[in-house]
Image: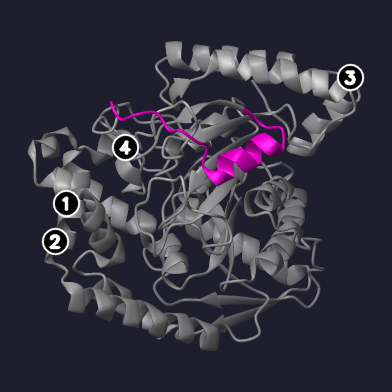
Amino acid sequence: MTMTSIRQQAQALAAGHSTSEALIEQSLQGIELHRRQGGSAYISVDADGARQAARASDLARAAGYVPSPLAGLPVSIKDLFDVAGQVTAAGSTLLADSPAAALDAPVVQRLRNAGAILVGRTNMSEFAFSGLGLNPHHGTPLSPCAEGRIAGGSSSGAAVSVALGLAVAGLGTDTGGSVRIPAAFCGLTGFKPSARRVPLSGAFPLSGSLDSIGPLSHSVDDCALLDAILSGEALDTRAAPLQGLRLAVTRDVLLDNLDPEVSSAFERSLAWLEQAGAQLRWFDFPELHELPQINAAGGLVAAEAWHLHRGWLSSDDAERYDPRVAQRIRRGAAIDAAAYLDLLGERRRLIEAARQRLGDADAWLLPSVAVVPPRLADLQADAAFFACNGLVLRNTSVINFIDGCALSLPCHQAGELPVGLSIAGLNGQDARVLQVSRSVEQLLRSKLDATGGCQ
């Protein structure tokens, strides 16, 4: 099953070549087949609600009402967003018996207002606390691009739903890479906007200081369209000419211990950009070496997650947690108020350092993830899991810590394991990141002779 870009789908609907009812039925049949084959992208599916919404969308279109290019198209929702009438369990069993949400989260309501058809809730790392996407309660989604290898997390099911064509886009969250990691591992495009551009209310939090909400889809154009809907802010995202673009690259930390496939794809992309007239500026960012020590006790994520979960983890409910998630959250108990304020101070210092280091660069380039998707079988032991999780989160989490924004593009050749290239910027530079990303995407597609995805 395939799912083309949002605008292509919108054009097909406008031309009468398809209907929303037909698209939604195709999506629901694909989801059912995926589940029968043992797939775990979705935790729950609202088939009746999706069919009713599709019928209403077709009637509205016939009457001339089409609120956006997303109208009538299937979209998946990560399990941590409030959807009216549904339980927000955040990938856990702990919250499975909680009352249903009374209202949609603002981002969910904005998708509905744009005409999106919500087909179901997608799987995720429990409480979004892992970059690998393993979930002992609901199964672990695997990358459609690489047999036996993980989809990445925490928005694992969102990525698989899009990569398999079960939705045209997935709504995810990103606290340390949870949109960009699964995008990289599943051959997709994923955008992490500047935090607070998209309202976080109605989304089960992991770390209020670092959480952000963003889309996973098939192209930069898809992500820009979705970002405008989610943020309520129409940015100028027209492609920036590659000739003369100032693209910053640092060797500090972010290029350490790369898998050979990642290193090859990244270096190849840089070479193509230089040939196209972009100016690469290698720079030093020694402050990045301090991050392991700054976050040695668990960092802002552990501190803020412990504040939310401490009641449950101090009761009999603790037995209902994924033990690896509980272990990471409990680290926050040792972070007192003074240490927490120190963390906030260190973050402010690194944000300022990033401003100084990046200077007048149009964007910052880095491998989205240091490794190709790991094999699920290699992550069964705790030591292997935690070591891999740290390496997978390393590059993406830098962007969250410096309060930036970033987009991950597929940059692998056909037959290669999936690799993501990140185009990043500072807080508020979302428009420039999207402009640069459009041009980089055009170049990569012309060179790779592909449109991303599982090749």
Residue 54 visible here: yes
Q: Which mark is residue 24?
A: none
Q: Is residue 399 above or below residue 310?
A: below
Looking at the image, residue 93 sits to the left or right of residue 352; the answer is left
Residue extending furthest toward the front: 102
**Can you identify the residue that label 4 sits on?**
134
Choose between 149 and 67: the one closer to the eye. 67
Q: CA distance from mark 3 to mark 2?
A: 58 Å
Amino acid type, callout 2: Ala
Which amino acid type is marked by label 1? Arg
At horizontal 41% and vertical 43% (from top left) the residue drawn is 152
Q: Earlier in the sequence, mark 3 or mark 1?
A: 3
Residue contact at pointers 2 and 4, CB within 8 angstroms: no
Q: Mark 4 belongs to which amino acid?
A: Leu
Q: Residues within 10 Å of mark 1 (few under 14, many from 20)?
A: some
Q: Which residues are magenta?
A: 97-117
Q: Are marks 1 and 2 in contact (CB under 8 Å)?
A: yes
Tag on residue 333? 2
- Residue 164, how many percent across, how many down? 57, 27
Q: CA distance from mark 2 to mark 4?
A: 24 Å
Q: Nearer the viewer, residue 354 or 276?
A: 354
Q: Residue at x 23, y 33 (%)?
A: 94
Mark 4 is surrounded, within 10 Å at the Cα level, by few (under 14), some (14 to 19) or many (20 or more) other residues, namely many
Lower position in the chain sequence, tag 3 or tag 4: 3
Q: Which mark is residue 16?
A: 3
Indicate yes or no whether the magenta region holds residue 252: no
Type of amino acid at the residue the image marks with label 3: Gly
Q: Which residue is mark 1?
A: 310
Q: Which is more foreground, mark 3 or mark 2?
A: 2
